Amino acid sequence: MAATAHLDTFARDRLPPRDAWPEFVFNDDTRYPERLNATAELLDRQLDAGRGEHAAICYPDASAQGGFSTLTYAGLAATVNRIARVLTEDMGLIPGNRVLLRGPNSPMMAASLLATLKAGLIAVPTMPLLRARELRTIVERAQVDAALCDARLLEELEPLRQAGGPSHCPSLRQLRVFQAPGDDASLDAALAGKPADFAACDTAADDVAIIAFTSGTTGQPKGTVHFHRDVIAMCDLFPRHILKPTEDDVFCGTPPLAFTFGLGGLLCFPLRAGATTVLAEKLTPESLLDLIEATRATIVFTAPTFYRQMAAAAPGRDLGSLRKSVSAGEALPDATRQRWKAATGIEMIDGIGATEMMHIFISSAGAEVRPGAIGKAVPGYEARIVDDQMRTLPPGTPGKLAVRGPTGCRYLDDPRQHDYVRDGWNLPGDTFVADEDGYYFYQARSDDMIVSAGYNIAGPEVEAALMQHEAVSECGVVGVPDPERGQIVMAYVVTRAGFEGSDALRQALQDHVKRQIAPYKYPRRIVFVQQLPRTETGKLQRFRLRQMAADMEPVVDGGAGAVSAARR
């Protein structure tokens, strides 16, 4: 590793042992100099190329003519530089300190992330829907020093700063809010007096830039560590070889910037191409179509759940500007691909990536698309199908997907590193089949992760939330197939003495889970049972819960996500 610019070496000191890292494979696209700052590469290079007045970010603004405002590359750079000055001059943060970022897809969230990297700090982006309990785990695991938070999302973060409170995190010493008009202590107010220039920290290419948290099958989040070179590498493979954007493109979509799918597709990819990105909050399938029409977007990123609903609403819309659509986050059914193509004439670009890998590593576009397949290994990555002994399996044989390239898994101080990396290969936890032409066909998750509408949901985390309700004696949570969301969360619940299963209790349990953890994780179906299937040693048999679900005919009761189970 090159000499670090980090004065605080917390993250570097907690990387896995080198013999537990995957083997990194570089080519002409991804060989970078030893000194590299991701924000300087993404943003300052565009200014050097004379694109200062080109639109960088377009965003909804009710006060603006046409309902949208634009931030140019020069304007974005000025905001980023001022935030970097606040972080270093006013807040006294030093290279290597961790900064939690909390906000929806907005110019200030984007600028805060870029400023954090430019100052040599480590960004810890978090999903807007996370609750205080989940945020506390992240803050403690990463020993977060400071936070930048949208004022509208402060409620779940504030308990972490209340000394003496049950959620207090001593490491979180400083907090600045943004989007807070009239607040003299806000980040917005602090920017007013700052110069618009800032010299990028002289970070090493392998200095830590981002710690992105992802839930494991146990519900305990894993911090995936990414270097400055990883941020640039994800921009120089899938976009360069599959997406092929230009500076005239306008990107839009739904994934949060805190999710590496959104970080790439809605911020880093467009900046690397000198293009424009549209950042908007709380989109629905209908409002995303509105956004495409209004901004003349050319590239859209979202999950299959949205594409299914957008295809039905697309007829009669003016979507003539749209050239490319990217699907990732969950399995793309061929029926959804065909409906979207019939509605828009656009062949979907499907892809599989992982937070551990940073972004998409298998995909195909245009004439290279093959029905039922996600695609081929993106140039710069290698993939194969292996058995439990890491032996390569012949074409047509289901097995574990193994992949390697310029990015890969490095968990922050976590023994689960050995579960994800074996013999130098990353094992994302998916079962695939490959054909003789190198196309990869997704089969299923290899673990107990539930993938619903693009979100990864750990069953044990939902179980832990349910068990905190007084009516629950035992519970087991699995994912079951759903035509709209790919999978949904289904809970089997054994009630305590004195409680009986009912529609009212189902609704109460769902509401309880939504208060405990991110609302998208709640069980959309709940079945009350007398006992759960367990081994002789007491271990819950999840495979039998899935078999029970397959043997049941779901009957929706009253719109609360409740079901009664009728044997087929």
Image (cartoon, helix red, strand yellow):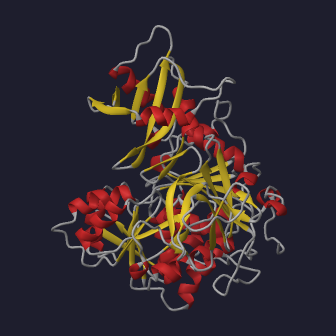
164 left or right, relative to 295: right
Q: Is residue 230 above or below residue 557?
A: below
What number of labels is visible? 0
Depth order, front residue of 350/213: 350
Of all residues, the one furthest to the left in this rendering is 316
Depth order, front residue of 437/191: 437
Quarter occupied by the C terminus: top left
| Residue 175: image location, x then y, percent | 61, 50
549 left or right, relative to 196: left
Q: Is residue 204 above or below residue 541?
A: below
Q: Is residue 371 above or below residue 99?
A: below
| Residue 379: image location, x then y, percent | 58, 80
Q: Residue at x 39, y 85 (%)?
A: 248
Answer yes or no: is residue 22 visible. Answer: yes
408 left or right, relative to 8: left
Q: Residue at x 38, y 62 (%)?
A: 280
Answer yes or no: is residue 64 visible. Answer: no
Depth order, front residue of 299/342: 342
Q: Residue 422 lies in what quarter of the image?
A: bottom right
Q: Is residue 407 above or below residue 15?
A: below
Q: Residue at x 68, y 40 (%)?
A: 169
| Residue 60: image location, x then y, percent | 33, 65
Q: Residue 350 lies in what quarter of the image?
A: bottom left
Depth order, front residue of 407/81: 407
| Residue 400: image location, x then y, percent | 62, 58
351 left or right, relative to 280: right
Quarter occupied by the N terminus: bottom right
